[in-house]
């Protein structure tokens, strides 16, 4: 009888708390203090997914079989007086291109519909050992190729602000999960904008770390010299918390940097006085919508009022970034995806001979955009064309990097819009790949140069769709990115708005 009353009181307390509105920092603090149990928190977000996922399509599956026991173990540790990890009790949604031991990892492809990894990606291992709880795998464009999640082989994820509009891509499901309050935090991957563009479209914060800051071990590779894993959250403060867990050298990934990881939270509260911000002129040209231009210009005034100084800078070679990216990324993809041949990992078409098995398996289980990229990449790498395409694109990539190096001699951060427009409608660019590729026009150069970049909410258009501001920093200077983003978020409340 008493326990019945207690249970009802607890339920009442939890519903007053509105767990889905809590930040990651608040969740961790409440689990630590005992005000909220990891089990209630995890169950709450699983219930949210149950209620909201049919309409939003952010998750391909939940992982409650492992999530709930993990949450119970954290509660037991707390009851036993043990010190909890820095992320104890924090539910996290993980993009389905990232391996999770014992849980299907499809990368949004029918090729991998039955692939169950026997190991966790390094970032998943780190999140779990810090006490985070993986609650599900999020929807994505097949093999992370796309900007709308329309290329998911399963179903499209939708933009929670307006279901007629795309959430962006390729980490569209991860953006939807956070924006629709189905998860407080999610993990995405970004090869040419796949964290920042959906973050911009869905009104959340998304950080692509410096190339090498976060291990790629266990990330199903799209373009290995460009791919990075990063956090998608409501705020920069939450992004800093997640970054602390996933950053750092990993012996399983030779491209992960042997570099000290700073305490990302230390700099967050430092004032911006003296910070030099470069406004990238190339990102304010034709094709930028009026609403985006206005909001980004307004954000410059906010940053100035916080003590930053702003000056115009130029990255002249970024005009070639899309062209270079759409040669380099398909080249690497054509090589990376050759492993999906029906022999290991994947589904298989059974035939009498091996060559037919390869080609029929790939013909049957890859979607059109993936085939498109494999053909482009194979062509660009083929004998006689390599110099004209891949080599030339690599040289352009170096010129873009040189532009950044030069700009960072005079400024600390580079500012501009994340995407030229707000979220487009389903089908709007589906028939025109070039129009779709142009959605990445401001994001791809950070990947080509290897610099970190963040997208934060900075306004809404007349239709109530979110607008994103992009800040880019020197290699390994995520701290300054997070500081500027956090300071901006202390003065604005765009990141606190939620879709109805
Ligand atoms: N939209 C870009 C592409 O289709 C970027 C994708 C990504 O960052 N994974 O390649």
Image (cartoon, grey):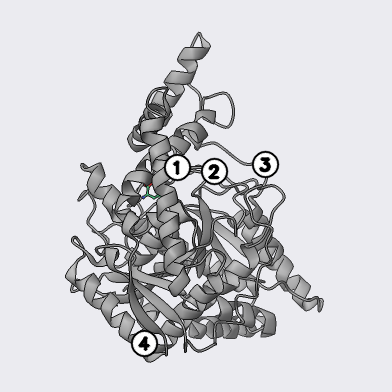
Name the residue tied to disc 3. Answer: 118
- Badge 3 marks a residue whose secondary structure is loop
Indicate the position of residue 97 as horizontal and vertical percent values. Answer: 51, 47
**Mark 3 in CB contact with mark 2 (< 8 angstroms):** no
Q: Residue at x 55, y 49 (%)?
A: 98
Point out the image quarter for the C terminus.
bottom left
| Pair 3/2: label in front | 2
- Which residue is more in the foreground, 232 or 61? 232
Q: Of the two numbered discs 1 and 3 on the same chain, state the one appearing first in sequence.
A: 3
**Mark 1 in CB contact with mark 2 (< 8 angstroms):** yes
Q: Is residue 74 left or right of residue 378?
A: right
- Density class for disc 3 (Cα within 10 Å; few <14, some 14-19, many ≥20) is few
| Pair 1/4: label in front | 4
Name the residue tied to disc 4. Answer: 304
Tell me, yes or no, if residue 194 can be seen here: no
Q: Of the two numbered discs 2 and 4 on the same chain, state the one appearing first in sequence.
A: 2
- Badge 2 marks a residue whose secondary structure is loop
Residue 178 is marked as none
Name the residue tied to disc 1. Answer: 143
Q: Residue at x 59, y 55 (%)?
A: 212
| Pair 2/4: label in front | 4
Q: Is residue 352 above or below residue 224?
A: above
Indicate the position of residue 53 as horizontal and vertical percent values. Answer: 41, 59
- Badge 4 marks a residue whose secondary structure is helix
Residue 313 found in image quarter? bottom left
């Amino acid at each position: 009888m008493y326990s019945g009353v207690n249970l009802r009181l607890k339920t009442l307390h939890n519903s007053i708390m509105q767990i889905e509105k809590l930040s990651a920092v608040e969740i961790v603090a409440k689990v630590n203090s005992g005000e909220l149990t990891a089990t209630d928190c995890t169950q709450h977000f699983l219930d949210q997914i149950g209620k909201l996922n049919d309409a939003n399509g952010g998750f391909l599956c939940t992982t409650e079989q492992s999530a709930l026991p993990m949450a119970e173990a954290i509660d037991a540790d707390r009851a036993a007086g043990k010190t909890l990890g820095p992320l104890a009790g924090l539910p996290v949604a993980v993009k389905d291109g990232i391996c999770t031991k014992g849980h299907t990892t499809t990368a949004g492809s029918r090729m991998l519909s039955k692939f169950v990894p026997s190991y966790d990606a390094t970032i998943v291992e780190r999140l779990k050992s810090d006490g985070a709880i993986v609650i599900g795998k999020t929807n994505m464009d097949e093999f992370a190729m796309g900007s709308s999640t329309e290329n998911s082989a399963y179903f499209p994820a939708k933009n929670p602000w307006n279901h007629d509009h795309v959430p962006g891509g390729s980490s569209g499901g991860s953006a939807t999960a956070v924006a629709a309050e189905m998860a407080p935090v999610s993990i995405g991957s970004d090869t040419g904008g796949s964290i920042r563009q959906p973050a911009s479209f869905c009104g959340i914060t998304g950080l692509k770390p410096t190339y090498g800051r976060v291990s790629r071990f266990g990330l199903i590779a799209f373009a290995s010299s460009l791919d990075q894993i990063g956090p998608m959250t409501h705020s920069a403060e939450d992004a800093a918390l997640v970054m602390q867990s996933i950053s750092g050298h990993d012996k399983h990934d030779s491209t992960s940097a042997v570099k000290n990881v700073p305490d990302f939270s230390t700099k967050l509260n430092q004032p911006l006085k003296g910070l030099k911000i470069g406004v990238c002129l190339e990102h304010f040209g034709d094709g930028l919508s009026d609403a985006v231009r206005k909001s980004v210009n307004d954000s410059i005034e906010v940053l100035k009022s916080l003590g930053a100084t702003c000056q115009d800078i130029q990255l002249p070679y970024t005009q070639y970034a899309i062209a270079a990216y759409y040669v380099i990324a398909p080249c690497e993809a054509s090589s990376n995806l050759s492993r999906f041949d029906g022999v290991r990992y994947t589904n298989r078409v059974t035939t009498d001979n091996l060559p037919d098995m390869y080609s029929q398996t790939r013909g049957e289980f890859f979607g059109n955009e993936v085939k498109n990229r494999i053909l482009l990449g194979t062509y660009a790498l083929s004998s006689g064309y390599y110099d004209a395409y891949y080599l030339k694109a690599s040289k352009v990539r170096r010129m873009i990097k040189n532009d950044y190096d030069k700009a960072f001699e005079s400024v600390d951060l580079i500012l501009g819009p994340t995407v030229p427009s707000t979220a487009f409608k389903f089908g709007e660019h589906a028939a025109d790949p070039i129009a779709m590729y142009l959605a990445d026009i401001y994001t791809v150069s950070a990947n080509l140069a290897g610099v970190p970049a963040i997208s934060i909410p900075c306004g809404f258009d007349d239709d109530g769709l979110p607008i994103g501001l992009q800040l880019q920093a020197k290699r390994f200077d995520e701290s300054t990115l997070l500081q500027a983003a956090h300071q901006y978020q202390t003065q604005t409340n765009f990141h606190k708005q939620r879709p109805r």
